Image (cartoon, rainbow, N blue to C red):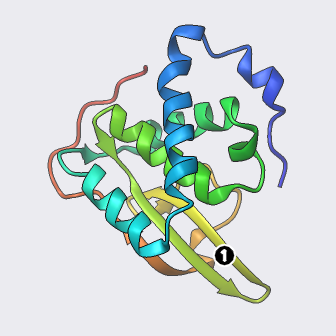
Amino acid sequence: MSQPMVPAARSRLPLRRRPPVLLATGAARLIVMLKPHRVRRVLSVLRRGAAPATASQALAAREVVVALSARCAGEGCLQRSVATALLCRMRGVWPDWCTGVRTSPFRAHAWVEVDGLAVGEPHQSAAYHRLMVVPALPQKRLPENPS
């Protein structure tokens, strides 16, 4: 899996846009230390009131999370997916948050998706058997916002 180098990506994100991303990645780090059923419970509570995210909104959130967090840019898929979902929530939207496993070869993974498609992932999420999903609650989507 090739990921962009973190220092190069950091220089492209203005200082004024960093605090919410850092808050999301820090909160995600704490959330992923919980037991799985508590992670699902916390995320289920946090998604309330959010409109379903569009693919571009989820991808924008994922890109800035990866840009500012070396842990999320690497193999930290659980923290990356939770941070992406939290940052989306701060922007008033929620993607589907998913975890799953595949058997050949065995691998566990966590990701966000929109309309059944994984966002920003180099592989197909269809190869994974979903174990946990915190879906967006059905309601009207918010219009695209480039910020």
Residue 38 picture location, percent across and down: 40, 68
As helix, strand or loop, the secondary structure at mark 1 comes to strand
Mark 1: give few (<14), some (14-19) or many (20+) Cα within 10 Å.
some
Q: Is residue 56 above or below residue 7?
A: below
Q: Is residue 107 visible?
A: yes
> Residue at horizontal 53%, vertical 71%?
99
Q: Position of residue 70 (x, y in %)?
A: 76, 38
Q: Amino acid at mark 1?
A: Ala
Circle count: 1
Which residue appears at 15% of the width and 45% of the height?
140
Q: Quadrant of the N terminus?
A: bottom right
Q: Relative to 52, does residue 37 appear above or below in the rendering?
A: below
- At 48% from the left and 73% from the top, the residue drawn is 36
Residue positioned most to the bottom? 103
In the image, 45 versus 89, the foreground residue is 45
Q: Is residue 119 visible?
A: no
Instruction: Decide which of 133, 115 is in the foreground and name it.
Output: 133
Please tell me in which quadrant of the rendered image residue 64 appears: top right
Q: Is residue 36 above or below residue 58?
A: below
Q: Quadrant of residue 6?
A: top right
In the rendered image, which quarter contains the C terminus? top left
For label 1, the residue is: 108
- Is 8 rendered above or below residue 28? above
